[in-house]
Amino acid sequence: MERGRYSKAEIESFVHSLLTDGFCVLPEHFDRAKLAAWGEAFAPLLERHIEHEGRVQNRGARRYYVTLPFELPFADPEVFEDEDILAVVKGLMGEDAVMCQFATDTPLFGSDSQDIHRDAPPLFPETGDETPPFQLAVNFPLVDVITDNGPFEVARGTHMMLKEQALRCIESGAVRLEPLLLRIGDVVIRDVRGLHRGTPNRTQTPRPMVVIGYSRRWLFRPEVSIQIPRAVYEKLSDRARFLLRFNPVVDSLDEEGREIYQSFAY
Ligand SMILES: O=C(O)CCC(=O)C(=O)O
């Protein structure tokens, strides 16, 4: 069995941070050269997306959500089957967790601050209570994230609060929005219910942030499914096939695939 970089105790401490703070950071986790190659392959995808769907700016001005094609360089088992990340995922989503999302968020020059939001509604809104975690986002940037290019801001510990209560804590200053300044290679794992927002990119260089979603096996978010080309599927490990088991295997990727993940903020 492959081994990750972290010990069992360190993985448990990441899981603990996710349970208490709503997120954790794995510094310098991925190879920078690998992610630089992703950045090069992503640039034309972003351009094509803006050309075809640039008018849909529902995430805010000059801010785009682009699903990644599940093929190389992106569909890299060293990334989506990373031992440490999967250990944290399994610690929170269970041994039968699934991978449900493979995409990017990119603010460009001219973007602004998003409304503070979470990425999923509560499972049982009528109870007025939050539940244990059911969906995680693994985020990593394809460029260094600095103050000027639109750091993601997160409000620590708000994933287990009701949204109104969490917003009051932010307003009163009891909880602050923390900008996550990241180097390319750093990885953030977060409970998607933690309140957060994208901030303005004031530079001329796009700031792509990859998002890989993992969830409890019973969570169904059809708006973020991953199309797996058959030729890629044939080469996947048994573990990858298990992780991806509820996603469609297709003969070829739909080149004109419209983004259907439009309703994203709760
Ligand atoms: O700026 C980012 O990467 C975060 C964007 C975001 O939270 C969203 O669009 O839901």
Image (spheres, helix red, strand yellow):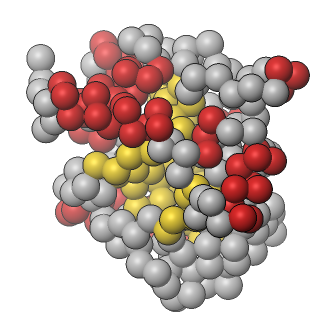
Q: Is residue 76 left or right of residue 155?
A: left
Q: Nearer the viewer, residue 24 or 70?
A: 24
Residue 189 percent location from the top left of the image: 42, 43
Q: Which quadrant of the figure has residue 10? A: top left
Tally the marks.
0
> Which residue occupies 40% across, 69% down?
181
Q: Position of residue 203 (x, y in %)?
A: 51, 88
Taking the image as shown, residue 121 lies to the left or right of residue 173, namely right
Q: What residue is shown at x 50% (from left), y 42% (from top)? A: 22
Does residue 68 appear in the picture of this structure?
Answer: no
The answer to whether residue 147 of the structure is visible from this angle is yes
Q: Residue at x 58, y 64 (%)?
A: 176
Q: Residue 168 or 254: which is nearer the viewer?
A: 168
Q: Position of 216 compared to 41: left or right?
A: right
| 203, above or below 87, in the image | below
Q: Quadrant of residue 12?
A: top left
Quadrant containing the C terminus is top right
Quadrant of the image occupied by residue 100: top right
x, y percent for residue 196: 62, 56
Instruction: Residue at 74% x, 65% y: name it.
Output: 171
Image quarter of the N terminus:
top left
